[in-house]
Amino acid sequence: MATALKGDLRILLRTILEPGITGVTGGVVQTIDIFKSIANGTGADQADRVWYDSAALGSSANTTIDLAGSLEDVCGNAISFAKVTGIVLQNRSTTCTLAIGPNASNGFGSGTVWSGTTPRSLVRPGGALCWYDPAGAAVTAATADLIYLENLTAASCDYRILILGKSA
């Protein structure tokens, strides 16, 4: 089935720091607002592949996501990534910590998303991780295509993950 992808990436963090001085009103606003409109294609700020999963990892369990293997999009189409442009991982648990990074063998993102071959980003309870690169990080089948996801705690952990990328 032919598909076309479009979407938006939005990250907003806005704070107001009030001085707490009697007679002084207002505050200082600090904002980081990142917005990217993503069109269908394989150029900069474009994508034509997306994979999404909402699942649970059992107590101290792990899984490997093969970016050039057996993934299917929500329409049931087999997909393979040539480049990954975005990863969003949301830890929906209130007690578990997740670790994500390149797999020890054939790991994706070593030196492009993560520094080194087996570093892990930790996503604590209720937390999230968002990585985005408009050009994308290369996926190489059987060499650099596996993402490792691990539950570091002794309880089941619910999560959502979305991986955005390009076919070429």
Image (cartoon, grey):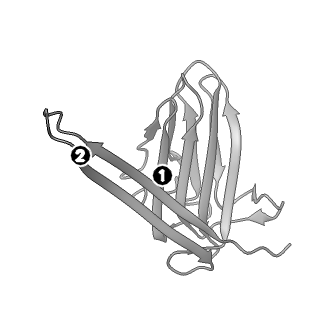
Horizontal and vertical percent position of residue 75? 82, 62
Tag nearer the camera, 1 or 2: 2
Vertical arrangement, residue 63 with respect to residue 61, above or below: below
Horizontal and vertical percent position of residue 54? 70, 42
Q: Does the rendering let one see residue 106?
A: no
Q: Nearer the viewer, residue 36 or 129?
A: 36
Rendered residue at 54%/55% (across/down): 87
Q: Secondary structure at mark 1?
A: strand
Task: Point out the residue furthest to the top here.
Answer: 154
Rendered residue at 67%/67% (across/down): 49
Q: Quadrant of residue 2?
A: bottom right
Q: Nearer the viewer, residue 68 or 154?
A: 154
Residue labelled with disc 2: 26
Numbered circles on residues, count: 2
Of callouts 1 and 2, which one flags the residue occurring earlier in the amino acid sequence? 2
Crowd tier of the residue under label 2, counting other residues whose Cα lies within 10 Å: few below 14, some 14–19, many 20 or above: few
Q: Which quarter shows the N terminus?
A: bottom right
Q: CA distance from mark 1 to mark 2?
A: 32 Å
Q: Amino acid at mark 2?
A: Gly
Vertical arrangement, residue 15 with respect to residue 131, above or below: above
Say left or right for 105 vs 18. right
Crowd tier of the residue under label 1, counting other residues whose Cα lies within 10 Å: few below 14, some 14–19, many 20 or above: few
Residue labelled with disc 1: 130
Horizontal and vertical percent position of residue 4? 73, 75
Q: Nearer the viewer, residue 165 or 20?
A: 20
Rendered residue at 57%/65% (across/down): 8
Say left or right for 12 vs 6. left
Q: Which quarter shows the C terminus?
A: bottom right
Q: Does the rendering let one see residue 165?
A: yes
Say which mark, if any, is on residue 3.
Answer: none
Q: Quadrant of residue 167?
A: bottom right
